[in-house]
Image: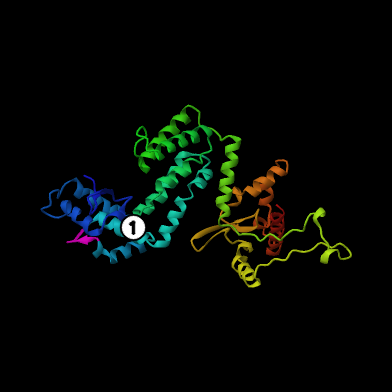
Amino acid sequence: MQVTKFNNADGTPIDLITEYGKIDVETLKAQCDVFLLPGGANFQTRATQNNKLMAECLLSSVTASAKQALIADRGQYTFDGTIYAPVLFKHMMKIATLDNKATSKWLRDQLKQMPAVMLEVKGNIDDFFNTFDKWHTQLIGRGEDLDDALDCLWDGLKAAPCEKFSKWIQDKYDLHIEDDPTWGPITVEELTKRVKAKYNLMVTNKEYGSASKEQAEIIALRAQIDALKGDLKLSVAPKGNSKGDKKDKKGGEKGGKEKKTKNTKAKGDKQRQKQEESWKKTPPKDGEPTTKTVGDHTFNWCVHHMAWVWHKSENCDLGKKRAAEQNHVSYAAAVNSSPIETGTSSNFRALMSTLAQAALDEE
C-alpha cells in the first residue's frame, strides 16, 4: 500500500513527494493513523512496513548535524512512540526549503522566461519540460501555483527552433484559444503528454530540425530583448547634426562651429542614476565569481558588454555578432584570454568596460 498518496482537506488526491505543501499536518496524520495506530483498518499491513522503511531511509539520508536537529523536533512527527514517515518527510521539506514570498516570486519569474529556456536547451523538448517541471513542482510544493502556468508553457514551446514543430505548436495553440472541441480542454499535464509524443515521433522520423533563417533571427531577437530588460540602460550622448545641417552659433558666428545640444536632464537625477547603476560596470576582481544575486535577480558578468547583465557571456548576441564580423575567427577564444581569465589587473578591465561602452554608443 502506498505511503505517499493521500487526499488533502478538500478531498483532492495529492502526491506527497511533489505536492507536500498541498496537505496540512493534521489531515496527513489522520490518514496515517489508519495504518499506524493499533486497531486501524490497515494496521500491520504492507503500508505499516513501508512507513518503517521510509522513516529509516529518510533519517539515514541526512548528515549527522541535520539528524540531531530532527531528533530535537521529533515531537513534530512522532506520535505514541511511532515515527510517521509521511509527516517526517513534510517536516524535513519545511526545514530544507525557503518557504517565503521571495522564493515563490523567483520561481514565478523563472516560469515566465520559458522562451529563453527553450533557447538555452537548444530546442531539446525533454530538457525544456524537465526545467519547467522543476520550477513548477517547487511552486506547487509550497502550496502555491501560477495562474498562467499553461500560457508560460505555450510561450516557451512556440520558441522551439524547429520550423515544422513550431508551426504544429502554433496550430494547436490556435485551437486551444478558440476552444476547439477537436483539441479539447487542456491542462499542463495533458499538454506535456501530447507535445512529448509529437516531439518523439518527429525525432524518430528525423523531422525535428533547425529553424529557418527568418525564425532563428526572430528567436534570437526575442531572447535579446528579454535579456536587455534587466541590463544597464545606457545614456547615449547626443550626436551632432549632420554636415549639411550644421548651424553657426548665434545665427552665423565666425568659424561655423557646430551648436551643441545640452542634456536637459536634471543633474541630481542623473547623478543618482549613475550611483545606482555604477555597480553594473564594476568588473569582478581576480578569483571572484562571475555570477551574483542582487535583489530578486541573478546577474552575470558579460565580457562582451563588460557589464553585469542577465545573460551569460556565451549566450551574448553582441559576442556572436563580433565573431561573425571577424571572418568567423572565434571571438570566444579572445574572451578566454581576456583579463577575467588571465588575471590581468582590474584597471585593464575597467578600460575594456569603457571601450565597450563607447562601442555600444556608436551602434
Image location of residue 211, percent across then percent down: 56, 35
Quadrant assignment, res 221: top right
Residue 283 in sight from this viewpoint: no
Task: Give the residue at x 15% y 48%.
Answer: 42
Q: Is 218 positioned to the left or the right of 2 in the image?
A: right
For the residue pair 324 and 363, the one nearer the viewer reads as 363
Callout 1: few (<14), some (14-19), or many (20+) C-alpha neighbours within 10 Å? some
Depicted 14 relative to depicted 293: above or below: above
Image location of residue 270, percent across then percent down: 64, 68
Task: Give the residue at x 50% y 64%.
Answer: 295
Depicted 271 relative to depicted 62: above or below: below
Q: Amino acid at mark 1?
A: Met
Instruction: Give the mark count.
Output: 1
Q: Is residue 344 magenta?
A: no
Image location of residue 339, percent across then percent down: 68, 57
Per the image, the residue denoted by label 1 is 93
For the residue pair 327 and 51, the one nearer the viewer reads as 327
Residue 81 in sight from this viewpoint: yes
Q: Is residue 78 magenta?
A: yes
Q: Is 217 positioned to the left or the right of 197 in the image?
A: right
Tell me the quadrant of the picture where the N terminus can be found: top left
Image location of residue 350, percent across then percent down: 69, 62
For the residue pair 288 and 305, the one nearer the viewer reads as 305
Q: Residue furthest top?
A: 205
The part of the chain drawn in magenta is 77-82
